[in-house]
Image (cartoon, coloured by chain):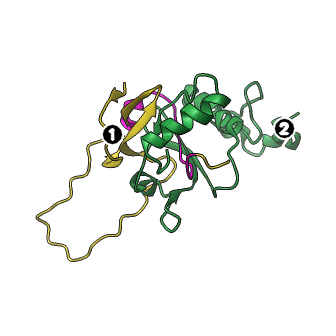
Amino acid sequence: MSIDSVFVHKMWNDNELSKMVKGGVPFPMLSDAGGKVGAAYGIYDADAGVETRGRFIIDPDGIIQGFEVLTPPVGRNVAESLRQVQAFQLVRASKGAEATPSGWKPGKATLKPGPDLVGRVWEVWKTSMAFDD
Amino acid sequence: MPEEFKPGCARPTGGPVGEKPVVAAADEKSSVKEEPKAMIQVGKKAPDFSAPAYYQGKFVNVKLSEYLGKWTLLCFYPGDFTFV
């Protein structure tokens, strides 16, 4: 979503993005002229008249599970966004019985918070696990 | 799912996703006008909105609440044809 019109979205998709992504952008390119939606999400820069680089993870119940906002010159890490969605999906599937520690990615160990784990995380989680192997 | 439309304006529906919009009490005489503030907080409902979109060759209206039941990534960016 940006403050551009749907007509500009069409031109950008058809003339540039479709040359990067086969078939063009696979999701709706939303238009928010005036920035009202961006303002509701707290990411509209009224001075510049544009939206900043906000990214919101919204779960199946419509609840915001996470967000990230960057100023314009630095791009997002798509893989990190997907990792976070996978982590939230795992937590949701476990109905909160499992949690994903720092550095978790699919295949890595989760934590099962409870009385037995208090003070003993150091036994099951090492700082090296915060980083990619 | 999204239906084709005549392009209009994006607008917040005025309520959290999946819930009825909060109707402002018009008859209530309050001299204090509240500043609209962002109501973004993790663990809380996302503000619902309806917005025009370009999607697979068509102009459509997209409402966030249509995506209830799915995991959704909502991404904002400064502008088309910018570089990042």
In the figure, is residue A80 to the left or right of B13?
Answer: right
Q: Which residue is mark 2?
A: A129
Q: Is residue A23 above or below residue A60?
A: above
Badge 2, how many Cα within 10 Å: few under 14, some, many 20+?
Answer: some
Q: Residue furthest bottom?
A: B31
Is residue A61 at least partly visible in the picture? no
Task: Name the amino acid type tagged 1.
Answer: Pro
In the rendered image, residue B69 lying in the magenta stretch gets the answer: yes
Q: Chain of mark 1?
A: B
Please tell me which residue is depicted at 39% across the width and 55% down the height of the picture: A36
Q: Give the residues drawn in magenta, as a range.
A: B63-80
Where disc 1 sits, the SS reads: loop
Q: Which residue is mark 1?
A: B7
Question: Which mark, by number, is residue B39?
Answer: none
The C terminus of chain A, quarter of image: top right
Chain colored yellow = B
Where disc 2 sits, the SS reads: helix
Q: Position of residue A49 (x, y in %)?
A: 49, 62
Q: Position of residue A87 (x, y in %)?
A: 65, 33
Please tell me which residue is depicted at 20% across the width and 77% down the height of the picture: B31
Q: Chain of mark 2?
A: A
